[in-house]
Amino acid sequence: MRILTSTDRKLTAAVEQTGLNPQTLVEQALEAHFRRLKVEDPGPESQGDVA
């Protein structure tokens, strides 16, 4: 995944402020966004769906 330079700067600031790692922050943000959108986990990927 690529992110904009300004978003990367914000992520770096969030890492410094929270002490969390970038992976954790991004996963938490995505999960919060998915909850707001009411997007649910469709279940495990099949062999043909691997990116």
Image (cartoon, helix red, strand yellow):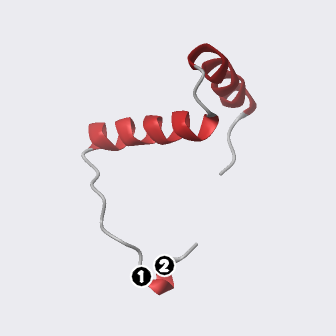
**In-image side of 23 versus 9 (left or right):** left
> What residue appears at the point 48 percent right and 78 percent down from the top-left corner?
49
> What residue appears at the point 57 percent right and 27 percent down from the top-left corner?
20
Q: Residue type at mark 2? A: Asp
| Residue located beneath label 1 in the image | 46
The quarter holding residue 41 reads: bottom left
Query: SS of the residue at dot 1?
Result: loop
Label 2 Cα neighbours within 10 Å, binned few <14 / some 14-19 / many ≥20: few
Q: Residue type at mark 1? A: Ser
> What residue appears at the point 69 percent right and 47 percent down from the top-left corner?
2
* Residue that extends furthest to the top in the rendered view of this protein: 17
**Mark 1 vs 2: CB contact within 8 A:** yes
Where in the figure is residue 48, as x and y percent of width and height?
49, 85
**In-image side of 26 versus 41 (left or right):** right
Mark 1 → mark 2, Cα distance in angstroms:
5 Å
**In-image side of 39 versus 29 (left or right):** left
Q: Nearer the viewer, residue 14 or 33?
A: 14
Q: Is 49 rendered above or below residue 5?
A: below
* Residue that extends furthest to the right in the rendered view of this protein: 5
Q: Which mark identifies residue 49?
A: 2
